[in-house]
């Protein structure tokens, strides 16, 4: 369960603005105190350390046996519990925790998000009909839903719109342990709230200006929504199911040794001419005269012709070069040409035909497997994921009622 792009952007802006160590004034329980706040901090620390089931037990104990929790804290804790259960595939327990949060009637974005998570749990539990009913109810305008008002703590107001503490805590709960450590302090929550309010204010202004009616905006929203859904589907169906062992990586390395080596390096000179006829004339002249003489007389590159056509600096395969822009074309043209020899093939660019002389070259040595094992595994995983995505798309087209009118593409 991740934040929407807008919320993620707010979090990112906040982190950039607050790129500093957590304040020494962070709220922490005093030694010997074991009150509600101390227990909540302990639960958060358990989760940050990866002890998620222990964190669940602590949050449940707080909810069930501690009378000091506010409604917002109960909602926020229930959402955290549900998130952990969903991550571990325990959808029935997640649903129970979400129902507890929903019974306290959270409003706004948090309420809508809890409904969305409940729908996902129901669908994964095979309760499609119940998921459909909840989806229909959640899709109704807010005025048609339950009129009951929440008593949750209001931390900000924008006109008639309210932002509740439970929503802020739920946003924090969805973040990585590293990010939560930065924003769970009072100062961190304040900065996060300011960014959230600013984002809402700008959104309200955009709506008041009628930007949502712009056809381009509507199309962009639709395309972004589809892209997010497809990416999530691919992540669930493909990315998490690809396994690459060390043996697989070694076999991939052996089959693609040319990709795992130091880059080749060369220093070259060139003679530039307009066409093939002039190139033939240059090559004939080189059989009788020295390179520097022919270059000065026949090269059309005014910047280098009087310097023997030398390209300054070393050209490294796979890296950009200030003068020799087409690095790939250069290495293709010179091939295995030895130092001191003229490449049999010329290189064509917008400037003309380049006749290349290799002045010096250093061929890259192959890397040992242990040095590139992780890179090989990453490349193999990417190729397998791409193949799996292709198969997923093929099956989607095959199993759905799809008609493609290829003949209309030429109109």
Image (cartoon, rainbow, N blue to C red):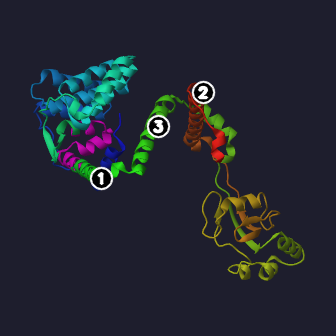
Q: How many marks?
A: 3
* Residue drawn 16% across the image and 21% down it: 64
Q: Disc 3 on helix, strand or loop?
A: helix
**SS at circle 2:** helix
Q: Earlier in the sequence, mark 3 or mark 2?
A: 3
Q: Nearer the viewer, residue 372 or 307?
A: 307
Q: Quadrant of residue 126?
A: top left
Give the Cα separation between the discs numbered 2 and 1: 41 Å
Question: Which is more toward the observer, 260 or 121?
Answer: 121
Q: Looking at the image, do the residues carrying marks 3 and 2 touch, with CB atoms under 8 Å apart?
A: no
Q: Identify the residue shown where x is 74% and y is 65%.
A: 348
Read off the magenta span.
168-193
Q: In this orientation, does residue 76 appear?
A: no
Q: Residues within 10 Å of mark 2 (few under 14, many from 20)?
A: few
Q: Which residue is labeled 2 in the image?
A: 398
- Residue on which disc 1 sits: 206
Does the stretch in magenta take in 182? yes
Q: Is residue 258 above or below residue 100?
A: below
Q: What's the mark number on residue 32?
A: none
Q: Nearer the viewer, residue 329 or 230?
A: 230
> Is residue 126 rendered magenta in the image?
no
Gap between marks 3 and 2, in whole Å? Answer: 20 Å
Q: Marks 3 and 1, how far apart in space?
A: 27 Å
Residue at 38 percent across and 19 percent down: it is 128
| In the depicted structure, whether residue 204 falls above or below residue 284 | above
**Residue 41: image x %, image y %?**
19, 35
Asked which secondary structure carries label 1, the reply is: helix
For label 3, the residue is 231
The kind of secondary structure the magenta stretch mainly shows is helix
2 and 1 marks in contact (CB < 8 Å): no
- N-terminal of the pair, mark 3 or mark 1, is 1
């Amino acid at each position: 369960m991740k934040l929407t792009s807008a919320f993620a952007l707010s979090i990112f802006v906040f982190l950039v603005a607050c790129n500093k160590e957590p304040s020494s004034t962070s709220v922490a329980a005093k030694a010997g105190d074991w009150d509600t706040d101390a227990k909540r901090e302990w639960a958060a620390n358990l989760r940050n350390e990866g002890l998620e089931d222990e964190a669940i037990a602590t949050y449940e104990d707080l909810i069930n046996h501690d009378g000091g929790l506010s409604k917002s804290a109960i909602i926020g804790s229930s959402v955290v519990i549900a998130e952990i259960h969903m991550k571990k595939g325990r959808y029935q327990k997640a649903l129970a925790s979400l129902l507890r949060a929903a019974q306290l009637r959270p409003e706004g974005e948090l309420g809508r998000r809890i409904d969305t998570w409940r729908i996902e749990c129901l669908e994964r539990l095979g309760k499609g009909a119940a998921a459909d009913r909840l989806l229909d109810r959640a899709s109704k305008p807010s005025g048609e839903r339950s009129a009951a008002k929440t008593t949750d703590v209001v931390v900000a107001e924008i006109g008639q719109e309210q932002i509740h503490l439970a929503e802020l805590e739920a946003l924090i709960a969805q973040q990585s342990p590293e990010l939560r450590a930065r924003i769970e302090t009072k100062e961190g929550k304040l900065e996060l709230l300011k960014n959230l309010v600013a984002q809402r204010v700008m959104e309200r202004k955009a709506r008041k200006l009628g930007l949502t009616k712009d056809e381009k905006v509507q199309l962009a929203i639709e395309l972004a929504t589809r892209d997010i859904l497809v990416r999530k589907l691919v992540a669930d169906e493909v990315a998490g199911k690809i396994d690459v062992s060390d043996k697989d990586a070694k076999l991939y390395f052996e089959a693609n040794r040319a990709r795992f080596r130091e880059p080749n390096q060369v220093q070259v000179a060139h003679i530039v001419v307009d066409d093939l006829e002039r190139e033939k004339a240059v090559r004939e002249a080189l059989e009788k005269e020295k390179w520097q003489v022919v270059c000065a007389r026949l090269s059309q590159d005014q910047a280098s012709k009087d310097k023997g056509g030398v390209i300054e600096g070393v050209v490294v395969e796979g890296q950009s070069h200030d003068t020799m822009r087409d690095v790939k074309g250069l290495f293709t043209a010179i091939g295995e040409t030895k130092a001191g020899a003229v490449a049999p093939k010329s290189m064509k660019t917008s400037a003309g035909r380049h006749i290349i002389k290799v002045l010096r070259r250093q061929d890259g040595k192959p890397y040992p497997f242990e040095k590139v094992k992780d890179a090989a595994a990453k490349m193999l995983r990417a190729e397998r994921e791409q193949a799996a995505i292709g198969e997923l798309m093929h099956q989607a087209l095959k199993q759905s009622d799809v008609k493609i009118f290829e003949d209309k593409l030429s109109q």
